[in-house]
Image: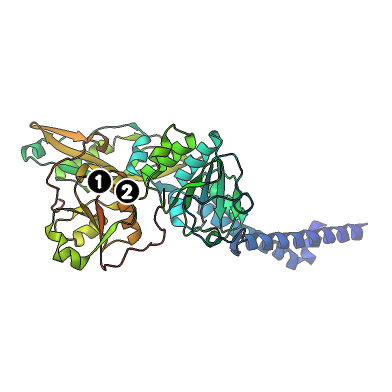
Amino acid sequence: MTSLWVRLVDKVTTIAIIALVILVGFLVYRRYSSSPEVLAVKTEEIRPGMVLSARQDGWKKGHKTIFLALSTDCVHCSNEALFYKQATDAAKRFGVDVLEWFPQPVGDSSAWLKRNGVSVSGLQRVSLSSIGVVGTPTIGIADETGTIKGVWTGELIPREQAFVLAWIRGVPGVEKDLPRSGGAPESISLDAYELSVRSTRHQLLDIQVRDYYHLGHRQNAINIPFDELDSRAIHELVPAERTIIDCTNVSMRFCQLATRDLYYRGFENVSMLVKTSTPATNGDAGTARPN
Amino acid sequence: MDFKICRHRLLRCSFWETVILLLLACALPIRSQTPREIRIGESQLRALLIHEVRPDFPTDALGKHASGVSVAQIDVGADGSVIHIEVLQAPTESMAAAMKRALNQWKFRPDTVNGVPIGVLGKITYYFIIDQGKGKVLAPSEMGVPTAAQPKTGDNP
């Protein structure tokens, strides 16, 4: 009888060990595998005017949709997590569909969303480049017909966040406030600045952090660190004047975000001072491409 | 009996321990990624404010006709109290001290992520201005938009 028990326990433990090994292997595979499941192949960059597809993008007809293209290893996505929480919560309340696209396995993406307090709905694993997403985070809005009304890549400035939340809530007349593209801001090379622009009427904005500004800055540059533009720019700069942002000592990404920020605040004449005269290119997160 | 089984299966017992350790190792990165503190913008930070004490305009600064912007970085604990203040910019030492004294008394509504209380880090701005000989301390939302024809240029203090 004892021998029978021992054999039984032996078999049960063996099966349990095999099951555990398989489970651990599966968990490790889920955590570290990154080969994405390609849902669709689109060569075009996602932009306003394009139409979401039910088969390829998971879009459902007849509802307004907000889509988020995120990644679990993207720092900017984590920075924006609170806004995504607000947006997805509002979407749930106001009957707006949410699509969440991640290149990582669904388990990892779901854990990331839950960890950051973002509702999990419409979560899919996709190859972001194959659906035309150029960088993370990307957020977009589409109307009932699936037509994309606005797409933003990178962290959103407060005005853009406010617009997206108002759009989700269906605030009357919000569409007219859809942040429009100001076109590519003018880039001024250092040579051109020194030769001709410097002597003209303008305000030079330096968006470096305070410590770096004190280490060295251009003459007459006004220092408003990038993360303080929201509360200070409108009170310390003159919107009607030509504003030149010194982009020679900060990343182009921050410079472009600062340009957008000022543009939305009513600064219509904003230029970027760059080291060369070639047009500015995207940094790691791209620029907004709203209507 | 259990003891007997375990004694004859020492290898298996250690294997179990290995499996448990592996499972723990898988779980650890998940816990370590839970945010404890997040950085938020000034408007979001002010939205969490439940008790504001405004800085006084220091009399010595008024005597010197000193005015300008003050910016402080504050660290708010998970319970909503201010646990650290660093004045990043202020026109005078006394304004920096006034800013610090006031911010020390601020209270915030505790913020949570996924139900877990978290600390927040953010910047607070005040403008120390002199209007008709009187010192005023204004929040950014109370400031107007400059319309001066002459753009402001020049090094910050």
User: A191 or B153: nearer the eye?
Assistant: A191
Q: Position of residue A144 (x, y in %)?
A: 55, 40
From the viewer's perspective, is A60 left or right of B118? Answer: right
* Contact between labelled residues 2 and 1, with CB atoms less than 8 Å apart: yes
User: Crowdedness of circle 2 by 10 Å Cα count: few (<14), some, many (20+)?
Assistant: many
Location of the N terminus of chain A by quadrant is bottom right
Q: Position of residue A281 (x, y in %)?
A: 36, 63
Q: Which residue is mark 1?
A: A233
Label placed on residue A261: 2
- Residue B117 in view (yes/no): yes
From the viewer's perspective, is A195 left or right of A184? Answer: left
Residue A239 occupies which quadrant of the picture?
A: top left
Q: Earlier in the sequence, mark 1 or mark 2?
A: 1
User: A171 or B97: nearer the eye?
Assistant: A171
Q: Position of residue B80 (x, y in %)?
A: 39, 37
From the viewer's perspective, is A26 left or right of B99? Answer: right
Q: Amino acid at mark 1?
A: Ala
The chain identifier of the residue carrying mark 1 reads A
